Image (spheres, rainbow, N blue to C red):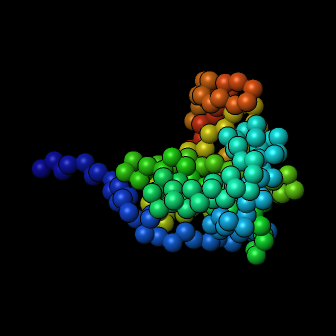
């Protein structure tokens, strides 16, 4: 008798929305936690940073814009569309953002996004946060495939991907519009069983 191929289980709709968004401690004293309305100034600062504006589509100019964005982060968690954390010193304002966008529970995939303010760059926080959220997405949420995409002109993000264990799968030509035009992007991925 020939047995039918095993079809992997999908993450059921409602699973993420039923969870409380967790907080994680990172090596070095930082934490990942849900964004708070009190973090609005950090979003405004990020929106004014030339590097963050160049590599991310972050157009937050006022505290009111920032508070709306934070409220949308919480709504998108409940809608199971994205899962965004603040990178922060415990008990303090956010210094960065990291999370999963383009979540597809039925398809078992998501794409990571991140930025960090200049005062925290180069210390390894984004690598540690990427590893921690990869573990959460694969093992706690139950996704199968995680993507990390970045412009080929952004070597810092390539280093994050490599250090966090995401394999380079190729280059997507003219894949994302940045302020200075269309960029080719590297596609890195982490799949269930890689770790």
Tell me if I can see residue 71 in this picture: yes
Image quadrant assignment for residue 158: top right
Query: Going by the picture, which residue comes out furthest to the left?
Result: 1
73 or 28: nearer the viewer? 73
Please tell me how many numbered marks the rendered image carries: 0
- Residue 15 in picture, x, y percent from top left: 40, 65
Query: Going by the picture, which residue comes out furthest to the front?
Result: 64
Image quadrant assignment for residue 129: bottom right
137 or 59: nearer the viewer? 59
4 or 33: nearer the viewer? 33
Image quadrant assignment for residue 123: bottom right
In this rendering, the answer to whether 168 lies above or below 69 is: above
In this rendering, the answer to whether 173 lies above or below 65 is: above
Q: Residue at x 72, y 48 (%)?
A: 60
In this rendering, the answer to whether 183 lies above or below 167 is: above
Q: Quadrant of the C terminus?
A: bottom right
- Residue 5 in picture, x, y percent from top left: 25, 48
Query: Going by the picture, which residue comes out furthest to the right?
Result: 119
- Residue 150 in picture, x, y percent from top left: 67, 38
Q: Residue at x 51, y 56 (%)?
A: 76
Left or right for 74, reference 94: left
- Residue 23 in picture, x, y percent from top left: 62, 71
Tell me if I can see residue 125 in this picture: no
In this rendering, the answer to whether 162 lies above or below 41 is: above
Q: Residue at x 59, y 36 (%)?
A: 187
Q: Residue at x 59, y 60 (%)?
A: 71
């Amino acid at each position: 008798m020939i047995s039918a191929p095993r079809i992997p289980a999908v993450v059921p709709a409602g699973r993420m929305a039923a969870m409380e968004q967790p907080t994680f401690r990172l090596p070095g004293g930082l934490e990942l936690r849900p964004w708070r309305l009190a973090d609005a100034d950090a979003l405004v600062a990020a929106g004014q940073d030339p590097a963050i504006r160049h590599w991310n589509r972050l157009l937050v100019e006022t505290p009111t814009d920032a508070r709306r964005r934070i409220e949308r982060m919480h709504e998108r968690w409940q809608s199971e569309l994205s899962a965004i954390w603040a990178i922060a010193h415990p008990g303090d304002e956010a210094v960065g953002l990291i999370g999963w966008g383009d979540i597809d529970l039925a398809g078992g995939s998501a794409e990571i996004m991140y930025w960090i303010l200049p005062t925290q760059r180069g210390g390894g926080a984004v690598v540690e946060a990427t590893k921690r959220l990869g573990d959460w997405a694969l093992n706690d949420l139950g996704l199968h495939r995680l993507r990390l995409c970045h412009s080929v002109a952004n070597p810092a993000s390539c280093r994050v991907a490599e250090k966090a264990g995401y394999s380079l799968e190729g280059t997507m030509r003219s894949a994302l519009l940045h302020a200075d035009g269309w960029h080719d992007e590297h596609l890195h991925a982490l799949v269930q069983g890689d770790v």
